[in-house]
Image (cartoon, rainbow, N blue to C red):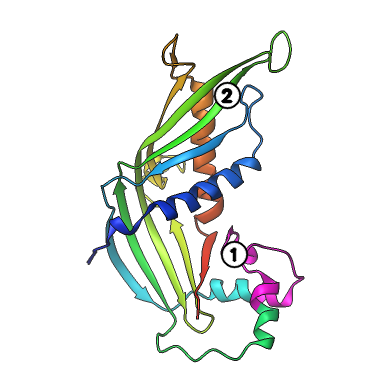
Amino acid sequence: MSVDIDYTKLDQSLADNLLSILNERLEEMQKPSILGHIEFTNLSWGDMAPDIELEEIGELSEEFNESDEEDVNGEDEAHEAADLKHPAQIRDSNNNHNASESQPKRASSTIPNMQIQLRITHESDMRLTLLTNLLVNFPSPGFMSLPVKLAVRGIVLHSKAIIGIDSQRRQVHFSLVEPYDENSEDDDDVQNHILQSLVVESEIGDVDRHTLKNVRKVENFVLEYLRNLLNNEIVWPNYHTFILDD
């Protein structure tokens, strides 16, 4: 069953939030010595909406509940609410458990707990822009610095998505699941990856002067960063939890 979405609801405010997450995670990564400060500066959603098909509606997975029980029974750790974390780490134990003791109980929801499985195909015209500097570290570190502008485009995404609705806790869990090709014996086959295609274009230097293009080391770093971020943060068994307002 095909699902219609209003792609125009993806506004600049949401783009700015995503850029903030990308830049925060980027600060935690070790980058090549030839690169200076890196910052994602612009995200354009484009006009091409994804194709979404409803595959199944069933019971909420016990794995979502198990991660909540681990947070309650285990040691408290400081986590950002609704952050991109591993299942056992996505809850803020101070905000989500202690606060509930002093607040009145929420009214029971009429929506049952459920899990929705979707198939997503997105050959997008989304465009992501970032800026950095290419450093020349000879004869001394940072001896020369050349501005670099990169654009990420040609994003093709094939994936299944899991949406877990926990109405009692007023939470929505979201995760992507890598496609699986039964005929492929190679786990590294591109057909088994969520990101089927990703193109990075680069310009180095002042465009009014000598311009260098296709600097592979810079481009490969960006490609690897985006793939790892997606896999480590939101590909199952990792997921993103949204805590709904009253």
All told, the count of numbered labels is 2
Residue 178 visible here: no
Q: Position of residue 222 (x, y in %)?
A: 51, 33
Range shown magenta: 69-96
Residue 183 lies left or right of residue 150; in this view the side is: left
Q: Is residue 80 within the magenta segment?
A: yes
Q: Position of residue 63 (x, y in %)?
A: 55, 71
**On the image, numbered disc 1 is attached to which residue?**
87
At label 2, the amino acid type is: Asn
The secondary element bearing badge 1 is classed as: helix
Between marks 2 and 1, how big is the CA–CA gap? 36 Å
What residue is pinned by disc 2? 133
Question: Is residue 57 visible to the viewer in this orientation of the structure?
Answer: yes
Q: Residue at x 63, y 87 (%)?
A: 103
User: Mark 2 falls on what kind of element?
Assistant: strand
Query: Of 23 and 31, which appears nearest the observer?
Result: 23
Q: Amino acid at mark 1?
A: Pro
Q: Is the residue marked by circle 1 packed among few (<14), some (14-19), or many (20+) residues within 10 Å? A: many
